[in-house]
Image (tube, grey):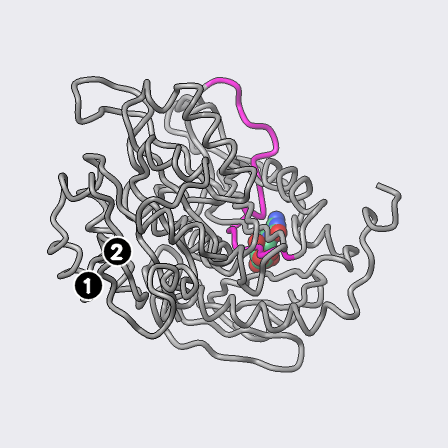
């Protein structure tokens, strides 16, 4: 189920103090089911031992062009030819310069030159070296040739200074690797998927709001999985306590009206909309501009008006594959079926509101008008992965009859 399972990853490690962080990456990749071959440059061996990577990957670590474990293919180019992805992390200014010049004077540069697999480069170095026009020109050259070169992060360096030059954390590198593999040959490559997540907040006054218990977990997991399957993802999120997924475009919104505007803008060019957000059905008619004060011992009546139905308003969009959610407290399937029709959806995902909202696990029933497919109670990450596989399958069945969008008709 992990998109990394069975993938052949070459992990090139260069001589930067950030090399210690990559031991964790090698472990994470291996646990995800990838076959990881670590190639270390001579300088990398000054920072970490080959035995560390060997123990974590369960495979020999390669440091030298002339002593490769032979498997019948032409020695020093065989690794690159077999790889699904080549990752260089940390990438030093020196290795970046050698790659930009097309040199192949060690095993790592030779492997890069001899591969057709996608290349991910994560620079990590002294901020002045990173900013240097020579390094920047080399990075531009590599990007122009199709390499994915990450921006180093800003923060405290090993030396006593603060700047842009830090290696992203292993979990972020893992997400970037998954995203790159997806863009290269995932089933959603070239597609734009919009996911909404979290709950909206409808202001009562400057400090209070009407909200709901949605945590955003399911929507965030769906966005990450759509990215791993190769999509360009826009995640439109109400306020949550979650860290936004890497390599996903995040649009932060607060109210249902904000969400409507963001969804309409993002869907102008989208293929799939997954409307997972718990959008408030009502909002206070007239939010107070001042904090509402208690009046003697009287209660408070707030008049509510209905919010627009964000996904329902897109019912006419026959060029967009739309997936909605129905969180219900009773008559789950009947309510979900009626929403499927009323909102003009292609699929609706029904779930028990009380048992799932704000919880780590979820059980789902996916309805398409005729069929009901049950997904058992499981973690939201696993549920998101299964659900997206189903969405991809139905999207591909729907595609041949897809109506051209206004954009394709030229009247945008
Ligand atoms: O009508 P109900 O809120 O139960 O419908 C749920 C589905 O409709 C979800 O996909 C939700 O994101 C979407 N929705 C919407 N706009 C609203 C309310 C819900 O798009 N105002």
Quadrant occupied by the C terminus: top right
Dividing the picture into quarters, in which one does residue 158 lie?
top left
Quadrant occupied by the N terminus: bottom left
Left/right of residue 403 with respect to residue 150 in the rendered view: right
Can the viewer see residue 23? yes
Q: Mark 2 and mark 1 in contact (Cβ < 8 Å)?
A: no
Q: Which residue is mark 1?
A: 60
Residues in magenta?
Answer: 272-290
Q: Which residue is mark 2?
A: 38
Does the magenta run of residues contain 282?
yes
Dividing the picture into quarters, in which one does residue 336 lie?
bottom right
Q: Nearer the viewer, residue 368 or 30?
A: 30
Locate residue 99, reporting x and y percent: 42, 40
Q: Is residue 381 above or below residue 139?
A: below
Locate residue 379, reporting x and y percent: 34, 66
Q: Is residue 137 above or below residue 403?
A: above
**Secondary structure character of the magenta stretch overall:** loop
Q: Nearer the viewer, residue 309 or 86?
A: 86
Q: Nearer the viewer, residue 63 or 37?
A: 63
* SS label for mark 2: strand
Residue at 62 percent across and 51 percent down: it is: 192
How many residues crowd mark 2 within 10 Å: few (<14), some (14–19), many (20+)?
many
Q: Is residue 208 above or below residue 321?
A: above
Q: Earlier in the sequence, mark 1 or mark 2?
A: 2
Locate residue 69, reporting x and y percent: 24, 67
How many labels were placed on the picture? 2
């Amino acid at each position: 189920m992990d998109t990394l399972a069975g993938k052949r990853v070459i992990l090139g490690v260069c001589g930067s103090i950030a090399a210690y962080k990559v031991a964790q990456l090698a472990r994470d990749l291996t646990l995800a089911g990838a076959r990881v071959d670590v190639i270390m440059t001579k300088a990398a061996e000054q920072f970490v031992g080959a035995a560390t990577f060997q123990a974590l990957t369960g495979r020999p670590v390669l440091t030298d062009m002339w002593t490769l474990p032979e498997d019948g293919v032409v020695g020093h180019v065989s690794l690159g030819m077999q790889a699904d992805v080549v990752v260089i992390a940390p990438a030093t200014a020196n290795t970046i310069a050698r790659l930009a010049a097309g040199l192949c004077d060690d095993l790592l540069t030779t492997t890069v030159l001899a591969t057709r697999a996608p290349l991910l480069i994560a620079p990590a170095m002294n901020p002045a070296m990173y900013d240097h026009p020579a390094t920047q020109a080399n990075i531009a050259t590599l990007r122009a040739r199709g390499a994915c070169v990450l921006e180093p992060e800003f923060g405290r360096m090993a030396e006593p200074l603060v700047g842009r030059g830090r290696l992203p954390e292993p979990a972020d590198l893992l997400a970037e690797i998954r995203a790159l593999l997806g863009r290269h040959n995932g089933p959603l490559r070239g597609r734009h998927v919009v996911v909404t997540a979290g709950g909206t907040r409808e202001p009562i006054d400057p400090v209070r709001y009407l909200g709901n218990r949605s945590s955003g977990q399911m929507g965030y997991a769906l966005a990450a999985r759509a990215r791993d399957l190769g999509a360009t993802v826009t995640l439109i999120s109400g306020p949550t306590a979650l860290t936004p997924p890497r390599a996903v475009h995040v649009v932060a919104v607060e109210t249902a009206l904000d969400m409507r505007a963001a969804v309409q803008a993002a869907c102008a060019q989208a293929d799939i909309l997954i409307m997972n957000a718990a959008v408030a059905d009502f909002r206070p008619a007239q939010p107070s501009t001042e904090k509402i004060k208690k009046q003697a011992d009287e209660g408070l009546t707030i008049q509510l008006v209905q919010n627009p139905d964000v996904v329902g308003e897109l019912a006419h969009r026959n060029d967009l594959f739309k997936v909605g959610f129905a969180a219900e407290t009773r008559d789950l399937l009947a309510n979900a079926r009626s929403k499927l029709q009323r909102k003009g959806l292609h699929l609706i995902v029904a779930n028990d509101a009380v048992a799932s909202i704000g919880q780590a696990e979820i059980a789902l029933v996916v309805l398409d008008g005729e069929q009901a497919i049950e997904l058992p109670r499981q973690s939201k990450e696993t549920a998101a992965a299964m659900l997206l596989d189903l969405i991809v399958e139905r999207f591909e069945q729907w595609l041949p009859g897809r109506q051209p969008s206004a954009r394709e008709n030229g009247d945008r």
